[in-house]
Image (cartoon, rainbow, N blue to C red):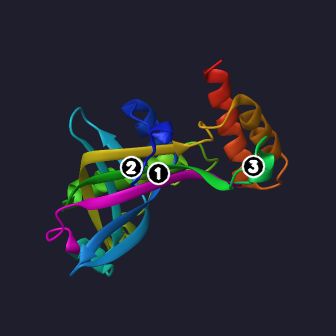
Amino acid sequence: MYIPKYFKVTDVSEIWDFVQKNSFGTMVTTKQGKPIATHLPLQLIKEGDPCYITGHMAYGNPQWRTFETCEDVLVMFQGPHAYISSSWYEQENVPTWNYQAVHVYGTASILNEEELKQDLTMLLQKYEENRENPVLWDKLSPQLLESQLKGIVGFKIKVGEIQAAYKLSQNRNETDYIHIIDKLQNEGNPNSKQMAELMEKRLKNHI
């Protein structure tokens, strides 16, 4: 990923926090030179060094069969994004787009049945524990679980290279920056509002 110096993020703890909060990612591999992508809920497993990204996909999805032949797997995570009009600047310029993105490269392997069960248990715990009637692993019938497990393949990706870009108008002067926040807040668009909140938080942290 091309990352100009203004927008490069290197703080690993900050990057992992972003991944945890934006964990529905896109996994890309290649088959005979052609890219294949799947959109998946993923988990970050930090057990010292290295870290792993885990997940599962349908058995019928051909992508998992590419793991053995792919030297690298690419996983992309994206946060809020928004169009930035150049009419919001003091001086003439061109429009742009603000965004947050993290790319993770690594090697993928298949989880065994016990590892897959453990990963699914953690996934349900993450998304169900705060719900009124949580559907957790131990509340589901063994018959249902057995039949569903036959239809999926679990995997883990050993994290190698990490690239992160937060393009939040850091290259604009303070007047433009504050004006952009104000304009985004009034766009009436959820993504624009989230971007405004991110930029405002960054501004407060740098004062």
Q: Does 67 appear in magenta? A: yes
Sooner in the amino-acid sequence: mark 1 or mark 3: 1
Direction top: furthest residue? 207
Q: Secondary structure at mark 2?
A: strand
Sooner in the amino-acid sequence: mark 3 or mark 2: 2
Per the model, the C-alpha gap separating discs 1 and 3 is 38 Å
Dominant secondary-structure state across the stretch colored magenta: strand
Magenta residues, start to end: 66-83
Q: Is residue 32 above or below residue 23?
A: below
Residue at 14% over, 71% down: 69
**Numbered tag placed on residue 23 in the rendering:** 1
Q: Secondary structure at mark 1?
A: loop
**Numbered tag placed on residue 92 in the rendering:** 3
Q: Is residue 49 above or below residue 207?
A: below
Sooner in the amino-acid sequence: mark 1 or mark 2: 1
Q: Secondary structure at mark 3?
A: loop
Amino acid carrying mark 3 in the image: Glu
Per the model, the C-alpha gap separating discs 1 and 2 is 7 Å
Q: Residues within 10 Å of mark 1 (few under 14, many from 20)?
A: many
- Are the residues at dot 1 and dot 2 in contact (C-beta closer than 8 Å)? yes
